[in-house]
Image (cartoon, rainbow, N blue to C red):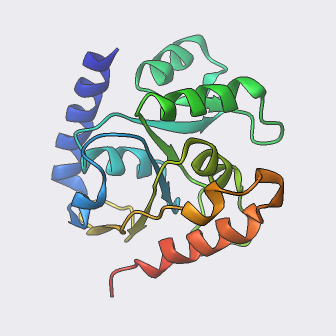
Amino acid sequence: MMIIYNVAKLACAIFAFIFYPFNVRGANNIPKEGKAIIVSNHKSNWDPILIAFITYRYIHFLGKQELFENKFFAWFFRTVCVIPVDRDNVKPRTLIDCLKLLKNGGVLGIFPEGTRVQERTNKISDGFVLFAIRSQAPIIPVHIDGKIRPWHRINITVGEPILLEDEFKKNVKDVDTEKIANEILDEVYALKME
């Protein structure tokens, strides 16, 4: 499975290097080992690939269920570590898979806005906050900026890890996950390179 992940990553890296030059700042903020949740804005279909470029670690991104309707694509996306999620009705299996991944020291990648947007939106999913609290994993904010067009420079900024230590001691029901999710997304957009 990881061989296909690495081959796909290399092929995309070569293509992107030629057509999509990019700057990276703060890549060392992604932990070299141990659990972590990468939370990023979502401008294009290239976003998961661009984020995968900046770390040697395997990132398991959440991907919409529709990507898995075709048998070949379902096999391919599972092979490159994509976890299917029904955005309208998140299944217990998805929650279990994500928490198991984090407990085993893996990296989960999430785009909380759920779909591609060019500007900050108020409609976001706060599920990643629950994952962070239950697994006690740090959240790594990432911002991607630039026109996703050939020969236009793309800027990727990785912020410092956010650890919700105060929330670890609380009952999850007492945590305002929506408020925290919005605050973290604000931090994601604050990373935009000037």
Residue 142 vertical placement versus 86 (above, below): below
Residue 60 in the image, given as x and y percentages of width and height: 46, 34
Is 44 displayed left or right of 50 in the figure?
right
Residue at the spot x=24%, y=27% of the render?
Answer: 6
Could one spot residue 161 in this view of the protein?
Answer: yes
Q: Nearer the viewer, residue 61 or 16?
A: 61
**Residue 185: x, y in percent?**
58, 70
The mark tally for this picture is 0
Q: Residue 72 appears at what percent x and percent y? A: 52, 13
Residue 123 visible in the displayed image: no
Vertical placement of 123 versus 119: above or below? above
In this rendering, position of residue 149 left or right of residue 6: right
Looking at the rendered image, the quarter that the N terminus falls into is top left
- Work out which quarter of the rendered image holds the C terminus and state it: bottom left
Relative to 148, 116 lies left or right: right
- Say which of 154 and 161 sits in front: 161
Please provide percent x and percent y for residue 184: 57, 69
Going 24% across and 59% down the picture, which residue do you hit?
27
Which image quadrant for residue 29? bottom left
Q: Residue at x 27, y 34 (%)?
A: 9
